[in-house]
Image: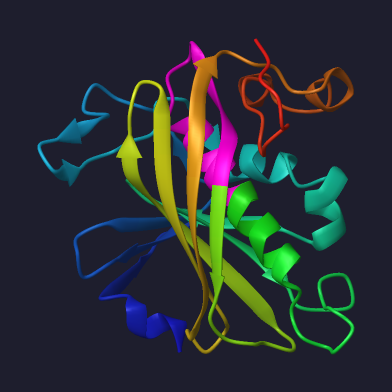
Amino acid sequence: MREARYRRTYCTPLMIIRHYPDGNLLYNGDDYFRPGPETGTKGNQMSVIWKKPFTMEILNSFCRKGLMAGLGISFTAFGDDWMEARMPVDDRTRQPYGYLHGGATAALIETLGSIAGNYAADEAHSCMGLDIETHHLRAVRDGFVTAHAVPRHLGSSVQVWLVTVRDEENNLIAEGHMTLAVRRRMRAAKDAAEKRPESSTLHVAGSTGKSRE
């Protein structure tokens, strides 16, 4: 069902490239994104927004411990101005009645929005959560849910991201709006940073509830 979202697919030995109807690309595999001089915005149309280099391995290194590991969150794809992650609907993420827990959905939205926001900030800055608003629209009992994040505003001090969450049948189950504060560069926890590639130590996902320099 999700394939209906794509216009056409190209396969190479290293990656799969899918074209969306709006012209964006999906990269999936051992690709490496490195910002170029075109990174930024052109008028009201978003171009390549990422300002720090990353790979899928670096993105998923954030999911090896802590809340993300406990919920089974993993990053699956990214494009010029969007990023995706998914989460299983199982005993780790269900509430007592057997449905996906709304708090787990909010955690998926904040994880994806925070990490996407950090890579959309320049090398001198990081992002931390200020506010998250989540609308739960449909129940789901099993399988996986996939979150898709796109920026609504990328400012010098504040970012706003829209994150939609869909089930395996491409039904919209939740929608979240996340506001991030752009601050001077923050570092990840020392024990986690030592186990990650160097370029991933600049970014901290999620809200801490207080500001840090």
Could you say which is closer to the camera, residue 25 or residue 213? 213
Left or right side of 189 for 131: left
Could you say which is closer to the camera, residue 86 or residue 16? 86
Question: Can see residue 63?
Answer: yes
- Residue at 50 percent across and 48 percent down: it is 178
Q: Position of residue 59 (x, y in %)?
A: 62, 42
Q: Position of residue 89 (x, y in %)?
A: 76, 78
- Residue at 70 percent across and 71 percent down: it is 102
Left or right side of 175 for 204: right
- Residue at 10 percent across and 37 percent down: it is 43
Q: Which residues are magenta?
A: 112-131
Residue 83 within the magenta-colored segment of the rendering: no
Q: Position of residue 143 (x, y in %)?
A: 71, 84
Compared to residue 164, the image places residue 95 above or below, namely below
Could you say which is closer to the camera, residue 38 or residue 8? 38
Left or right side of 45 for 65: right
Give the image quarter of residue 206: top right
Residue pushed farthest left? 43
- Residue at 76 percent across and 47 percent down: it is 63
Residue 118 within the magenta-colored segment of the rendering: yes
Compared to residue 104, the image places residue 115 above or below, namely above
For the N terminus, the image quarter is: bottom left
For the C terminus, the image quarter is: top right
Q: How many marks?
A: 0
Colouring method of the image = rainbow
Could you say which is closer to the camera, residue 181 or residue 75? 181
Compared to residue 2, the image places residue 130 above or below, namely above
